[in-house]
Image: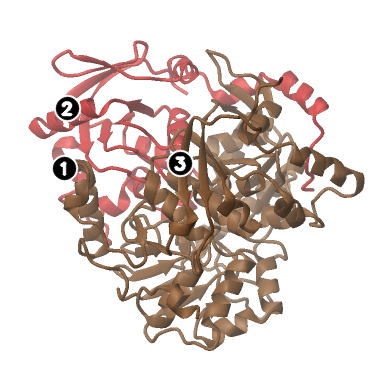
Chain colours: A red, B brown
Amino acid sequence: MHPITTFSAQIVALPVENIDTDQIVPARYLKTTNKVGLGDAAFADWRWNSDGTPKPDFVLNRPDVQNAQILVAGNNFGCGSSREHAPWALTGAGFKAVISTFFGDIFRSNALKNGLLPIVVDEDTLYQLFSLFEEDPATVVTIDLPNQQLVLPGGQRVGFPLDPFAKHCLINGVDQMGFLLHEDSMIAAYEARHPARVQTV
Amino acid sequence: MPIPRTLFEKIWDSHTVRPQTEATPAVLYIDLHLIHEVTSPQAFTELRARGIAARRPSQTLATMDHSTPTTPRNNLGVIPVIDAQGAAQLAQLEQNCQDFGIPLFKLGSENQGIVHVIGPEQGLTQPGMTIVCGDSHTSTHGAFGALAFGIGTSEVAHVLATQCLLQSKPKTMEIRVDGQLGRGVTAKDIILAIIAKIGVGGGTGYVFEYTGEAIRALSMEQRMTICNMSIEGGARAGLIAPDETTIAYIKGRPRAPQGQAWDEAVAYWQSLPSDHGATYDATVVLNANELRPMITYGTNPGMGIPIDGRVPTVAQMPDASQRLGLEKSLKYMGLEQGQPLLGQKINMVFVGSCTNSRISDLREAAALIKGQQVAPGVRMMVVPGSQQVKRQAEAEGLHEIFRAAGAEWREAGCSACLAMNGDMVPSGEYCVSTSNRNFEGRQGPGSRTFLASPITAVASAINGVVADPREMLN
């Protein structure tokens, strides 16, 4: 995974609560056996007509947000299914971060493993971001990961929580699989003390 | 005196390979890893890229369920897969299982079925275990007092490679259901009422433990229905303490412990229930006596009402964002605020999914539809949860009852719950579904879902409109 530290990007607001992973990527796109190529599947049913033409009133189809890399969404983004295709589709569509008041637990975990930042802010900040986007769709914010701060256009800094281990992995580009593989001797010791409870073979 | 612990804490502690610290999450050992065709291919790709084997194939089991057709078998007894992408995904799972030595229940084979139906059926799901699967409804297995939760594909690779996961300890929430259920009110109605009360984000960051008289009175299959939808309340896992009902269900199943190992296992299981004095981070209480059959009207499982209630009005919503959410949902659903759902015309009924496709669900549905007819213009699909459920139902003649009523009797799989396999609700049409999600497009693009119990689904199928099952149970 590539290390992530501080970056600035245009925001796009999707002020809808409880956006579930079936909206982020509908199940019919889950027949792929790859991680790549899911960008067009992101929000497919909101974004495309059944004939494949774009729905002009959906915000992500607006010409002035095509470079947006930070999605600002209503409460409880990413609830529902465990599909990691959701962060794959969002990163495929060019997003580096999603800002909301809280996230579905599995989505948050999946996002962090794919370098997609789930940034938690309070409701006032969320509404401030919605307003900023409404007033100026070109609004750019900065995400300062080492300091765990979101920097708004006027220079206002808003802190956000982040699990220290996730932060360490993101900043240093550490992959969690490598970390777990290093625990091999502890795992073996555990297995020696705890015989398998079931046999599937 | 040892500190009193909850059921969850006992399982967490006994599976901690390395404890959580300020800087790192816990390394948690996984006893059983279930996999299916949709969320595993990229995980195997990662193992191949790193040149590593599966650490414990004998603690791993694969099945085919999500993208499998449920159409009848051909003359050779084979279920044909027409969809090329689905077929490729199934073929890849077979190859992956072969290459990594993982046992697989192939499409149409005698034990194949929905991943959350087959684990318990085989006796693999046991109290005190940690169980994961790349599927959010893994919470189902919590009905046995196991810590079971859904994981992403990166984590599927972690478990394949190390049999472990990096996890931060979640908070605990007790959901106590006192009292007794009335006639026509089921486990599905309990869980829909819980989610309506706490909302779809109410359990985020928590593991649920369901307690109380009404929970203790449930069968294992009913408990699975409850735990299955923990994720719809935002919780990754939901547990019910093991008791005599649990032990009786497991005894004699193919993968259950035998002989002395059985006695030892039972003694261990009996040590698992939460200690007297153990505390939870939050508690929610419901009274089963007050519950009525529940149905959803909107586009998330928290948008549920008693079946004889009315859709809320925008003015009743506490804040602007919920007002917008309700308006958006009702527009999608083609419903009016304040309207009753009873009498709402429907086009389809789906009885199936990991929530409600077990033999007791099919028995209840069959008992109600026996001698009746599915209303003209309504399509009713009955999809058993596994090949074993299908065989049992056929041995009892349930399939003949469904067919005589005009319903379709199909092969086992996830089917129209998520519409990956061609079984879907046409755009704009209404389906009363025993599944777990009513999200926009969940049952096919433009589909409109009313979530309900199997008996509410059957009552609605017979009447051609949303109907109250209590009126048919005389």
Query: Disc 1 marks which residue?
Result: A62
Q: Seen in the image, is B168 located left or right of residue A129? A: right
Q: Is residue B365 above or below residue B163?
A: below
Query: Disc 3 marks which residue?
Result: B284
The outermost residue toward the right is B260
Helix or strand or loop: what does disc 1 sit on? loop
Helix or strand or loop: what does disc 3 sit on? strand
Q: Is residue B238 visible?
A: yes
Residue that appears at 25% across and 43% down: A16
Task: Please give the label number shown on residue B310.
Answer: none
The outermost residue toward the left is A135
Query: Disc 2 marks which residue?
Result: A128
Task: Tell me the subunit letter for badge 2.
Answer: A
Residue that appears at 37% across and 80% down: B464
- Residue A58 or residue A53, whichever sits in front: A58
Label 1: few (<14), some (14–19) or many (≥20) C-alpha neighbours in 10 Å: few
- Residue B72 or residue B303, whichever sits in front: B303
Q: Is residue B161 above or below residue B184?
A: above
Task: Tell me the subunit letter for badge 3.
Answer: B
